[in-house]
Amino acid sequence: MTGLQLAALILVAITATAVVLTPEALRQALVLGIFGLALTLLFFTFQAPDVALSEIVVSTVGLPLIILLALRKIAEQEHARDREEDE
Amino acid sequence: MSRRARLAMFAIAGPGLAVVMLIGMHGMPAFGHYHGVYGLLIDKIEVPERHATDLVTALNFDIRAFDTLGEEFILFASVAGVALLLRKLRHEREARRRRGIEDHSFAGASAGLQVASLYLIPLLIALGCYIVVHGALTPGGGFQGGIVLAAGPLAILLAGRYFAMKRLAPEWMLEASEAIGAAGYALIGVAGLIIAGVYLKNFLPLGTPAMLLSAGMMPINSVAVGLEVTGAFLVVWTEFLDQELFVERDGGDRA
């Protein structure tokens, strides 16, 4: 195992822990993107460029955007429910 | 469950999992020592028999092309599911264009961000096309290039112009692109059945390895998958964004 691979593995461990320890879902989505970037580095150093390419676009563009929009939708529905209960 | 009960459960389950994993990992081959037969075989036959220089694409689009057909329809079905879930419901109505949507500025897209996004659009589209058509030659292919392509129109949204994005990539075009991509892949398979006698079997000349038009039907498969993935991701994103920007519940007074 080369030093680069070791560094990528450690980076993945750190960022993955950071995702779990992030309390708020909104911030978690962004930290998840950084975790995806670390995974990309890992795949790249382990000579899997195809997987790295998929990972970088899915985890840094696709997934966070879908999570953010879904969170927004959930917040909106909860807001509406609260209002109905108030009435 | 109280915090104490959860901790107690973890105290039992954690070491248990650790033991099972240690036992499981004990018999694994050493790091970097690959023992599979299949991978070595593919490595040997793929350039002489398929004329593709990228092993992964050769696997996806030729040697195990049938698997890719299944994956394609998983994506297709899930996107259809999202579109169904986010359809306009009876108690929702399309809101009037609210002020500020045309150049809706989510916390203010700065001039720098707008210029940078405009630069990104052609670059992303060019890179996406490159990755799609060079699938059989270099790492990449329909799936990877497709998402890069989908990110192109999305950069317009980043510049704060959602309607301009919908003009560049209107919904009918996205849906058509997704459907044509999915159907195209299946139809290439049928062509293989008719011409070569086996579903998804290569029926095109293999060409010179490392040339753009080589590796038989792989480039065409790659383009079909690219079309589908581009359409699929953009459909999901625009469905969510439409919900966010236009749909309003009855009696809703959200500004």
Image: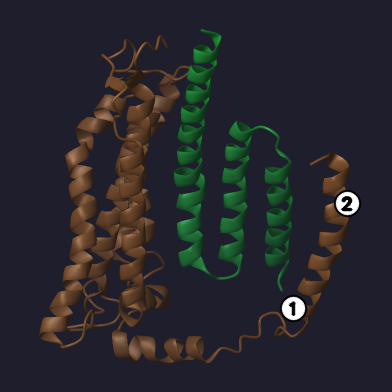
Quick one: A39 or B3, which is closer to the camera? B3
Q: Residues within 10 Å of mark 2 (few under 14, many from 20)?
A: few
> Residue type at mark 2?
Ala
- Residue at image coords 31%, 74%: B61
Residue B217 horizontal/vertical position (percent) = 22, 75
A29 is higher (above) or lower (below) than A83 = below
- Residue at image coords 45%, 20%: B106
Residue at which label 2 appears: B8
Q: Which chain is green?
A: A
Residue B24, label in figure: 1
Task: From the viewer's perspective, tell me whether residue A67 is left or right of residue A25.
Answer: left
> Residue type at mark 1?
Gly
Task: From the viewer's perspective, tell me whether residue B164 is left or right of residue B4.
Answer: left
Mark nearer the N terminus (1 vs 2) = 2
Quick one: A38 or B99, which is closer to the camera? B99
- Residue at image coords 51%, 46%: A60
Task: From the viewer's perspective, tell me whether residue B144 is left or right of residue B37.
Answer: left
Task: From the viewer's perspective, tell me whether residue B170 is left or right of residue A14.
Answer: left
Location of the N terminus of chain B by quadrant is top right
Residue B124 seen: no
Q: The residue marked by circle 1 belongs to what chain?
A: B
